[in-house]
Image (cartoon, rainbow, N blue to C red):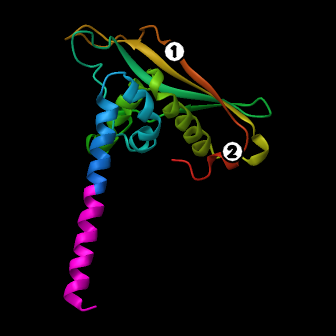
Amino acid sequence: MDRARLAALGSRFGRVVVSAFVTWHLAATFVVMIPLSPLKVRYFPTVQQYMLPLGLWQFWGMFAPDPFHESLVLEAEVVDAHGVRHRFEFPKLADFSKWRGIPRYRHCKFACNLLLDEFEAGRRHTARYVARRLNLPADAYPLVVEERLMLTPLPAPGQPPDPFAKVSPYKLGQYRIESPGELEGQP
């Protein structure tokens, strides 16, 4: 096979691969964006394995007619086999400088989406993430990870935040992780 034919074959193969990826991505985006329907119920479990870990989903709760009235802070509490409690606080945008915070902004959207029933897999991924980040020894397993959102009322427009506003916990779910082996190879 001569060089020209090999180059043409490689070019054609590259176009097919790129086209397949773009088609997959557009189809996955479509499935995530459509309202609850039989199509979404059928394909969302497959698509979420791609979309959720990469943060490629949408959430419209910040817009009218009914925007959020609370600030959401995601946290987790882990109880290990010895009964020791470990609190895990997810990073907040305010913890970073403006430039370091920009790529982390999707975290707010992530916390909002965890409220939705269809993001159960995202909550399970999050529980495994917490366990990996705590890096507990093998004898601490099994772990029970409880995820919750801390809800703080937002101040009225133009008003400063109330430092004494009541914070209400909202339990997202509780997940059991039997061994460190469950954490390997997971996003």
Check disc 1 and report its element: helix, strand or loop: strand
Residue displayed at 43% across by 27% down: 41
Residue type of the residue flagged with mark 2: Leu
Q: Is residue 186 left or right of residue 36?
A: right
Task: Name the N-terminal-most of marks 2 and 1.
Answer: 2
Q: Is residue 76 left or right of residue 16?
A: right
- Front residue of this view, candidates 182 and 87: 182
Check disc 2 and report its element: helix, strand or loop: loop
Q: Quadrant of residue 21?
A: bottom left
Residue displayed at 45% across by 40% down: 46
Q: Quadrant of residue 39?
A: top left
Q: Is residue 31 left or right of residue 179?
A: left
Residue displayed at 46% across by 7% down: 166
Q: Relative to 156, is 175 above or below?
A: below
Q: Quadrant of residue 55?
A: top left
Examine the rendering and report whether any part of residue 111 can be seen. yes
Number of disc labels: 2
Bounds of the magenta span?
A: 1-19
Crowding at label 2, few (<14), some or many (≥20) Cα neighbours within 10 Å?
some
Examine the rendering and report whether any part of residue 97 can be seen. no
Disc sitting over residue 136 in the figure: 2
Residue linked to disc 1 = 170
Q: Is residue 1 left or right of residue 79?
A: left
Q: Does the segment drawn in magenta span residue 80?
A: no
Whole-percent x, y for residue 119 in the image: 46, 28
Residue type of the residue flagged with mark 1: Tyr
Residue furthest out toward the bottom: 2
Magenta region, mostly helix, strand or loop? helix
- Which of the image's four quarters has the N terminus? bottom left
Whole-percent x, y for residue 124 in the image: 56, 34
